[in-house]
Amino acid sequence: MKQYYTCFSLMQEKYDRFTRDDRFLAATTKEFAVWKEKTRTLLRELTGMNRMLLCDAMPVEEEEELTKDNIIRKKIRIQTEPGVYMPCYLLIPTENRRYHEKNKKPLTFLALPGHLGGGKESIAGRKELPGIIRSIEQFHYDYGYQLALRGFTVFCPDCRGFGERREEALQGEEEEKYLNGTCYQLSHMAEALGETVIGMQAFDVHRLIDYIEQQGIYDMEELGCIGFSGGGMQTLWSAALDDRIKRCIISGYMYGYRDSLLELNGNCSCNYVPHLFEHLDMGDIGALLAPRQVVIQSCLDDHLNGKRGISNVYEQVAVMRQAYRLFDKEDRLVHDIQGGGHCWHEEALSALLKDA
Ligand SMILES: [Zn+2]
């Protein structure tokens, strides 16, 4: 074939014509509150979250073990939609445990998984499992365990499509199945029903927060949420739609949609929400986090930043910063920039937890 007749240019043109109709433009905190409410309603509609079904969590506690670092790794499971179950590790440090100064409850985080780490297994630092050690070395994926080593109580769930929640297509113990996820299959089932993978994943995170809240023993005043890559995506969306998340780290997941999702159109299907580009860019969703404490972590050579590199990140963080400026809380939004490619760096923890 001498020539290909693609849609690519027209798609770029359409993107430029029909984008960001509902962008963040508020000039006062009052306008921000109105925009935030309207935008949240829109996002729940676009992601299909408003079609998802509430149910009893029916929590089950499974086995627990003590790691060599004296961290209790307990396995629990909750129901998030009828017949849909979320297994989760709960990491409880036995030494130097951190508590909220006033209410004496343990300081608690959610640590959410991205792709290629076997779901919760890499986040919870299960280096003894095949393949997991390499994921941890490549992406520094054990950030849940890193938090526990710093004395925090950490929930490390499997998100839909990963770990024990893989759909039939990738079930099995072979490494290429075990480390991967079934976003593709989930999105095919979901989108024709008006739902999306990111909607399902954020909905589940909110149900896990319901569970944590109902226990009554964890600090909810400083509940944190962290994630890298697909875990950063879940953190962004979960926090954008739920103020119970008080502080978060979004690593390797903040960039403009045109360069990073339209032009890098081979990215995983979990990133794509029908009609989203028409309404918002990623920085607008990030603006919903203002004025909460947030660290955005970016790597200079991350290929997911797109062809313009870190400029495509700066533009979105600038949108977020405008929202923080309205509250005179710009210091609560930190942009931590690291060298190298797509990877989590523990400096994000130091930036969020000044004494960590
Ligand atoms: Zn995915």
Image (cartoon, grey):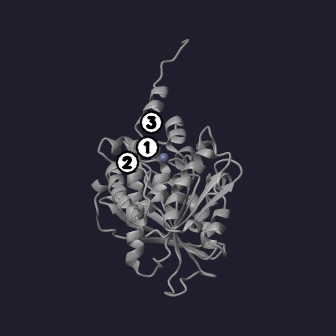
Q: Is residue 315 above or below residue 263?
A: below
- Please state the horizontal and vertical placement of residue 153, each as a whole percent of the image: 54, 74
Residue toward you, 48 or 31:
31
SS at mark 2? Answer: loop
For the residues labelled 3 and 2, say whether their Cβ atoms are less than 8 Å apart.
no
Quarter in which the C terminus is drawn:
bottom right
Mark 1 CB lies closer than 8 A to ligand 1: no
On screen, residue 17 versus residue 322, left or right, reads left
For the residues labelled 1 and 2, say whether their Cβ atoms are less than 8 Å apart.
yes
Alpha-carbon neighbours of circle 1 within 10 Å: few (<14), some, or many (≥20)?
many
Quarter in which the N terminus is drawn:
top right
State the mark number for residue 196.
2
- Please state the horizontal and vertical placement of residue 296, each as a whole percent of the image: 58, 58
Quarter of the rendering containing residue 121: bottom right
SS at mark 1? Answer: loop
The residue labelled by disc 3 is: 15
Residue toward you, 143 or 345:
345
Of the numbered discs 1 and 2, the one sitting upstream in the chain is 2
Residue type at numbered disc 1: Tyr
Q: Residue at x 30, y 45 (%)?
A: 194
In front of the other: label 3 or label 2? 3
Residue type at numbered disc 3: Tyr
Of the numbered discs 1 and 3, the one sitting upstream in the chain is 3
SS at mark 3? Answer: helix
Q: Is residue 155 above or below residue 287?
A: below
Mark 3 CB lies closer than 8 A to ligand 1: no
The residue labelled by disc 1 is: 272
Residue type at numbered disc 2: Thr
Alpha-carbon neighbours of circle 2 within 10 Å: few (<14), some, or many (≥20)?
many
